[in-house]
Image (cartoon, helix red, strand yellow):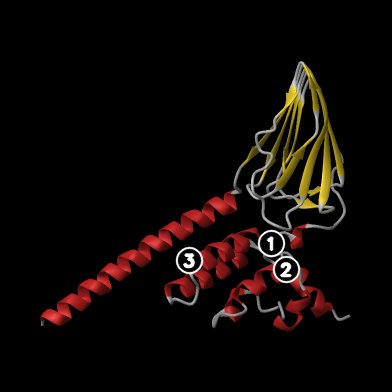
Amino acid sequence: MTSDEHLPELRASDADRERVAGILRDALAEGRLAMDEFEERLEEAYRAKTYGQLEPLTRDLPAAGAGLPAVAPRAAAPAARPASGWSGRIGGEATSRTGIAIMSGFQRKGAWTVPRRFTMFSFWGGGELDLREADFEAAEVEIRCISIMGGANVILPPDMALEVRGIGIMGGFDHSQVGVPHTPGTPRVTLTGFAFWGGVGTSRKKTKAARRAEAEAAREERRLAREQRRLAREERRKRLE
């Protein structure tokens, strides 16, 4: 295997992601992409970590070659992990397997790899797991929460499957996020354990990249609407002349 075949797995920079975002915005303005396609691809672009995840987003657009650094060969791109969906975020070695808070706190957030089984223990303290930007060792993971006179919170992305099996004794597990529609192929997270005079909460939030993509899409939609109004005025003016 040549060294070039590894290039799609090289880490992408913020500048690389912005170049791809620019191509997508141009494609939307030219009518090559529908709004829903633009929003989906833009979100994937800001979440992409490697060249191989960026390349498919512009592969079918005329300016695709400008979206990636010159060292990223398009010929090797088919071997890259899929950029859409969750398949590119499942697999790999776990980076952390436990979190302990004894009269203190802990937090796992950002880019980390969730193991098949993560244990979080809190005693007179609190812990937080943020899964929104995480990778996953397996498609099904268990988070075992033991909370004694303490608390724990698990933050999930909006489209992730969740099951709660924990037991509360003068405490409780939050079931409010169970049954929320999830995207096929997302990891399934199961919360187990027990809470004694404590609680385990769950919430769903969008990533900063997703919120940024939505804001960008809204701005682009407003710009297109202004352009359409301008063209309509021009057309009316021409008819009156």
From what the image shows, is residue 153 above or below residue 18? Answer: above
Q: Which mark is residue 82?
A: 2
Residue closer to the observer: 189 or 126: 189
Q: Residues within 10 Å of mark 1 (few under 14, many from 20)?
A: few
Lower sequence index among marks 2 and 3: 3
Which element is circle 3 on?
A: helix
Res. 123 visible in picture: no
Three-letter amino acid code of the residue under disc 2: Pro
Give the Cα separation between the discs numbered 1 and 2: 8 Å
Does 217 sit left or right of 79 as displayed?
Answer: left
Name above or below for residue 148 compared with residue 75: above
Amino acid type at mark 3: Met
What is the secondary structure assignment of the residue under circle 2? loop
Cα separation, mark 1 vs mark 3, equals: 18 Å
The answer to whether 156 is drawn above or below residue 33 in the figure is above
Residue located beneath label 3 in the image: 35
Left or right: 18, with 147 as reference point = left
